[in-house]
Amino acid sequence: MRFIHNLHMTRLHRAGVILSFFTGFLLILPVLLSLPLAATLAAQEGHAPKVPGLDRIINPGPSRQAFTGVVNSLDLKNDVLNVDGVSGSGTEIFPLKKKKVHVVTADGDKVKLEKLKPGTNVLVYYEQSGDRKTITDIVVLTASSVKKKTSPM
C-alpha cells in the first residue's frame, strides 16, 4: 500500500512540475514574440521616406519672413543690426553678413549698409531656419525724424 501511495505522489509531483513549466512558458511567450517586432519598429523609425519631394514637405528649410521697424543701432564691428518693431511688436536683433545683404530704398535705389542710421524706418526681409535668422534684404522706407521722449525733470 505504501508503494502505491508513493507512486501516486510521484505522478502528482511530475504533473505539478510540468504544469508549472508550461505556465511559465506561456507567460514568457508573448515577450519572446514581441522582441523581433520591437526591433523592426525601432529600425523603421529612423528610416527616411523614399517618396520624391516628401522630404521638402517634412523639412521645409528656411522660411522667408519680414520685420518692420526703426533702426535702433547698427554695429558693423560685431555684424549686428538692432531694430525696434513698430506698434510695440518688440525688438529684433539680426546677425549681419555684409556681403549677402542688399539695402535699397522704397524707390529701388541702392544704399550702402553703412548709411543706415538710428531712427531710420526699415523693412527687413530675412530667412529663418530653426533659431537662426539670416537677413537677405533691407528696404529703407523713410529716414524718420523720430524724437525720443524725454522725461520731465
Image (spheres, rainbow, N blue to C red):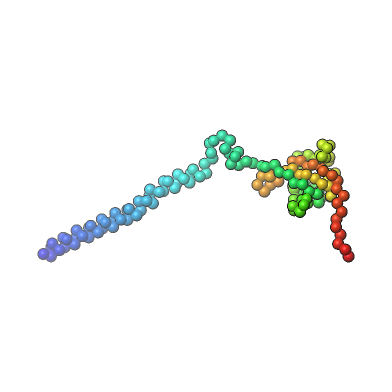
- Give the left or right position of residue 107, taking residue 37 as reference: right
Image quadrant where one finds the C terminus: bottom right
- Residue at 71% in and 43% down: 65
Q: Is residue 110 visible?
A: no
Image quadrant where one finds the N terminus: bottom left
What is the residue that sits farthest to the right in this orientation?
153
Count of numbered tags = 0
Nearer to us in this view, 24 or 136: 136
- Give the left or right position of residue 48, taking residue 21 as reference: right
Nearer to us in this view, 149 or 134: 149
In this rendering, is residue 25 above or below 138?
A: below
- Residue at 46% in and 45% down: 41
What is the residue that sits farthest to the top in this orientation?
52
What is the residue that sits farthest to the left in this orientation?
1
Q: Looking at the picture, how far across and down is residue 76, in whole percent?
A: 80, 47
What is the residue that sits farthest to the front in this orientation?
87
Q: Is residue 115 visible?
A: yes
In this rendering, is residue 117 above or below 56?
A: below
Q: Looking at the picture, how far across and down is residue 49, in whole percent?
A: 53, 39
Residue 134 falls in image quadrant: top right
Nearer to us in this view, 7 or 85: 85
- Residue at 21% in and 60% down: 12
Q: Looking at the picture, how far across and down is residue 61, in whole percent?
A: 64, 41
Nearer to us in this view, 125 or 31: 125
